[in-house]
Amino acid sequence: MQKTSLSWKAAGLSVGVVPTMGALHEGHLSLVAAAKQQCDRVIVTIFVNPTQFNNTEDLTRYPRTEAADTALLASHAVDVIFAPAPEDVYPLGFASQVTVAGVADPLEGRFRPGHFAGVATVVAKLFGMTLPDRAYFGEKDWQQVQVIARMTADLNLNVALQICATARASDGMALSSRNARLSPADRAIAGQLHPVMRACAQDLIQGQATAQIVAKAQKALIGYGFEKIDYFTYCDEQSLVSLDHFAPNGRLLVAAWLSGVRLIDNVAV
Ligand code: AMP
């Protein structure tokens, strides 16, 4: 992979990478489209990274649809699908880890211990393997973008990060590989998440206190049938420090459970 990428660069071509865990949907394809538009060569990586799963059941149940993914990417004319085996990514003796402090600590960091160390390590490795000029990530995983931006700057990785808007279904639900695990009835309940967030955004803009709004939203979600809410928070979109009232660069971030499936979403407010 490195040789291919280096040969492209030697020929003066720009290289973009879209890191994914497969089970591709329109959200991933919007990243691929952006990469195709901005880069001469596009690599899509498919790797279900075991070290970022803090829950073995989530890893085992993670959808794997290699044949469909390959067919989908063929119709988008990407240059390379790079799908390494776990033992090639983590060979015997592998002993390094990238950890990011600060922005990786709250929210997902708190509820999924070790998750961002897994993400930061594999993204650093994927950058090292694919040697891209640009890398494409989705706003859908907002905190992940902040962690990767911190790591890329801190480690002088010389990759320009391109952040793409969240692709949504017609009811506003953020597209996600994990949505495939929801029954039709649960998918209908899940569709309430985004409207509840939009309503919160309106209340925040009108000046209501965050604590009040969040309590109301959590109650509404439980009423619709969500089992548990890991967090429903309004915070500064870069530092992820909580905000008690509307502020410029604020963002609502949510993680909630429905029938054993953990859904996350975020919106700028
Ligand atoms: P994943 O395969 O879930 O690890 O996601 C791979 C990349 O696609 C990450 O940068 C995600 O943020 C991005 N992504 C996932 N879902 C969406 C979506 N609905 N809209 C835009 N990007 C997404």
Image (spheres, grey):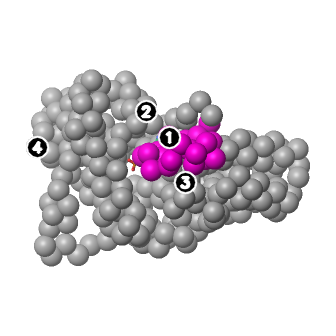
The residue pinned by badge 3 equals 263
Is label 1's Cβ within 8 Å of ligand 1? Answer: yes
Viewed as shown, does residue 168 lie left or right of 35? right
Q: Tell me, yes or no, whether the highlighted magenta stretch contains residue 179.
A: yes
Reply above or below: 226 against 45: below
Q: Which mark is residue 26?
A: 2
| Residue 38 visible at all | no
Report the amino acid beneath label 3: Leu
Image quarter hosting the C terminus? top right
The residue pinned by badge 1 equals 175
Viewed as shown, does residue 153 lie left or right of 3? right
Sequence-first disc among 2 and 3: 2
Report the amino acid beneath label 1: Leu
Q: Tell me where the magenta segment starts and ends, as one range.
A: 172-191
Tell whether label 1 touches label 3 (CB within 8 Å).
no
Q: CA distance from mark 2 to mark 4?
A: 30 Å
Q: CA distance from mark 2 to mark 1?
A: 7 Å
What residue sits 84% from the left and 46% below the top?
203
Sequence-first disc among 2 and 4: 4
Query: Which element carries disc 4, helix, strand or loop?
Result: helix
Query: Which element carries disc 3, helix, strand or loop?
Result: strand
The residue pinned by badge 4 equals 3
Mark nearer the viewer, 2 or 4: 2
